[in-house]
Amino acid sequence: MAIVLVTGSAGLIGSESVRFFCDRGYTVVGIDNNMRQVFFGEDASTEWNRAKLSQDYGDKYIHHAVDIRDHEAISAIFKTYSHDISLIIHTAAQPSHDWAAKDPYMDFSVNANGTLVLLENTRQQCPQAVFIFCSTNKVYGDRPNELPLVEKELRWEISENHPYFAQGIDELMSIDACKHSLLGASKVAADVLVQEYGRYFELANCLFSRRLFNRSKSFGNPITRVFILLNEMYDDRQRIQYLWV
């Protein structure tokens, strides 16, 4: 039995991942303890989404309300399914710059330590599984501000003379000697862990450093709502990009 394990399974990207694989006949194990309510308040609770996943997919979706930092609880889940786990999609995170500044320990423990717990359990229990990490472009700090941008009619583009123009920014762009937020620093730590576990232990790891995702319900994040409003107000130049989920 092929198992797909999704962290942050009741969140925006996580829940869509659950639906994608359940719709294709997989059994999905979800890990989500509704920390988004802790970060952003009652309106941000994902419990409604968790309940809907359970209602829609029945025993094809197995939910665990567990904190990814809890090594013993996470280890028990991995040991239960062991080599049946073929794919891990890690979307659980502390996503707020404000929270990172207010409580750096919480931020780092969720983003970095939580990722370490998942990686080590993958190595110990299902090293053949593919590990996908949903990271953030905040790992680049303010390095993108150094790129040569040219103002176009509807957006800003990288200069055609720059190596990144044809194919976009690749993994070789340096993140050193630039300013990172505390959120960016904790996500950098997680990024490097994912890369090193892949190289050092020869695990099938990959990561995506994406920017903002959105859909009709922004899961209670007030910052996302402000960005949506600003993006609607400014129609002369594109201020921000979204990938609609």
Image (tube, rainbow, N blue to C red):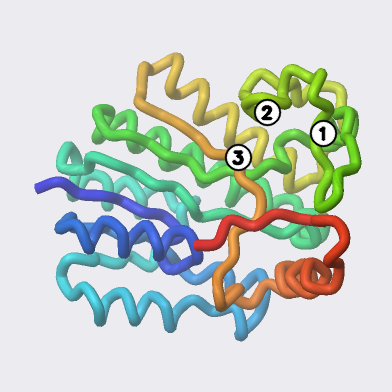
| Residue at position x 19%, y 57% in the image | 24
The label shown at residue 169 is 2
Q: Specify which label sits upstream in the sequence, 3 or 2.
A: 2
Q: Specify which label sits upstream in the sequence, 1 or 3.
A: 1
Q: Which quadrant holds residue 39?
A: bottom right
Q: CA distance from mark 1 to mark 3?
A: 13 Å
Packing grade of label 1 (10 A; few <14, some 14-19, many >=20) is: some
Q: In the rendered image, is residue 231 in sight?
A: yes
Q: Amino acid at mark 1?
A: Pro
Q: Position of residue 84 (x, y in %)?
A: 15, 42
Residue 180, relative to residue 5: is it above or below? above
Q: Taking 80 as reference, is 102 left or right?
A: right
| Residue at position x 26%, y 50% in the image | 4
Q: Taking 157 as reference, is 82 left or right?
A: left
Provide the residue designation for mark 3: 209
Q: Amino acid at mark 3?
A: Ser
User: Depth check: 155 or 142 in front?
Assistant: 155
Q: In the rendered image, is residue 106 in sight?
A: no
Disc 2 on helix, strand or loop?
Answer: loop
Q: Which callout, 3 or 2, points to the residue nearer the camera?
A: 2
Q: CA distance from mark 1 to mark 2?
A: 9 Å
| Residue at position x 38%, y 75% in the image | 50
User: Depth check: 181 or 119 in front?
Assistant: 181
Disc 3 on helix, strand or loop?
Answer: strand
How many callouts does the rendering have?
Answer: 3
Q: Are marks 1 and 2 in contact (CB under 8 Å)?
A: yes
Provide the residue designation for mark 1: 144
Q: CA distance from mark 3 to mark 2?
A: 11 Å
